[in-house]
Amino acid sequence: MKKLSDCFILSNNISIPCIGFGTWQISDGDAVIQSIHTAIETGYRHIDTAAAYNNEKGVGQAVRSCGLKREEVFVTSKLWNSQRGYEKTLAAFDQTMANLQLDYLDLYLIHWTANAKQFGDDWQKINLETWRAFEKLYKEKRIRAIGLSNFLPHHLEPLLKQAEIAPLVNQIEFHPGYTQRETVDFCNSHQILVEAWSPLGRGKLLSEPELIRIADKHKKSVAQICIKWCLQNGIIPLPKSATASRIKENALIFDFELSDQEIQTIDQLPLCGDSGLHPDKIDF
Ligand code: A2P
């Protein structure tokens, strides 16, 4: 990857730009519009939102007014947990598209797996019913790619067995100090591209001594090291920032490479900076 518009290729041959601009916790309206315009001017071509972020209207407005053709920007949104199930998913997708005011979506994800804690034995059935709606929307060409978020191997396995169309993406928490190796390996072996939410550990990793040492060596910031490390692991980072200087800083990562030794050192950092949100334990 040499620039922001360079792409990974999903297993259905759709190109997905290698760094996504994360919009979690950026308010709807001017804040998200301004941030996305700065991101697009910087060269980002991939925007990640979700129904739960409550900013889809601003995201859509920013994409429509950014000066690029629709097909030049890759847009992801996600189905919120309260909308699982076949009919509810179809209605939720219509609402997302009404918010975005776009003709199609590039990628739609189930935001969190249903789990046994909330749904007992029904969790697999609920995921499958939701997925059937995703498959229908994909076949109707309203979405170019469909996938999941926060699914672990034991959630993926039953879905893969029954899916007509296999998920193309799994977006998980992934950053130094939280590498979810088992899930990443499972996805890699099933041609599911991994995306990293909170690649900077929501800013919590910036004072980690080992990361500072590597950053200093490359004359880069810790944020840039985290983003580069994701990419060199074959994973799409989705850094979020509402600050223009940081949006630009997070894109300046194509003029250096981490050595194999440095990647290994970062891979092996002890647990740190994680959100504590485990897919089997959440109750929202
Ligand atoms: P802000 O939006 O105020 O710029 P993550 O993507 O891991 O969830 O991290 C997002 C958090 O990290 C936000 O609080 C964001 O702050 C902050 N952040 C993003 N980029 C940088 C950077 N280059 N340096 C320091 N903090 C950053």
Image (tube, rainbow, N blue to C red):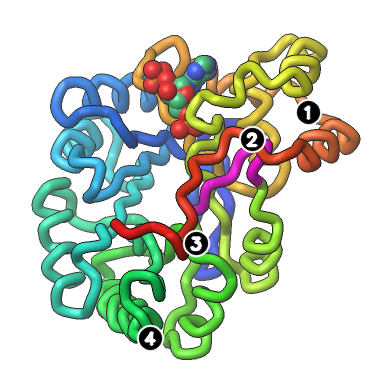
Question: Quick one: SS at disc 3?
Answer: strand
CA gap between label 1 and label 4 equals 47 Å
Range of residues picked out in magenta = 172-178
Residue 241: percent from left, percent from top: 40, 23
Residue type, numbered disc 3: Val
Local packing at callout 3 (Cα closer than 10 Å; few below 14, some 14-19, many 20+) is: many
| Side of 57 relative to 181 (left or right) | left
- Residue that numbered label 2 is attached to: 272
Question: Quick one: SS at disc 1?
Answer: loop
Q: In which quadrant is the C terminus drawn?
A: bottom left
CA gap between label 2 and label 4 equals 33 Å
- Evaluate if marks 1 and 4 touch, with contact meaning CB atoms under 8 Å apart: no
CA gap between label 4 and label 3 equals 25 Å
Question: Quick one: SS at disc 2?
Answer: loop
Q: Earlier in the sequence, mark 4 or mark 3?
A: 4
User: Which corner quadrant of the image does residue 273 belong to?
Assistant: top right
**Labels 2, 1: front one:** 2
Residue type, numbered disc 1: Glu
Q: Could one spot residue 140 in this view of the protein?
A: no
Local packing at callout 1 (Cα closer than 10 Å; few below 14, some 14-19, many 20+) is: some
- Evaluate if marks 4 and 3 touch, with contact meaning CB atoms under 8 Å apart: no
Q: Earlier in the sequence, mark 3 or mark 2?
A: 3
Local packing at callout 2 (Cα closer than 10 Å; few below 14, some 14-19, many 20+) is: some
Q: Earlier in the sequence, mark 2 or mark 4?
A: 4
- Residue that numbered label 4 is attached to: 121
**In the rendered image, the vertical position of residue 116 relative to residue 238, given as above or below:** below
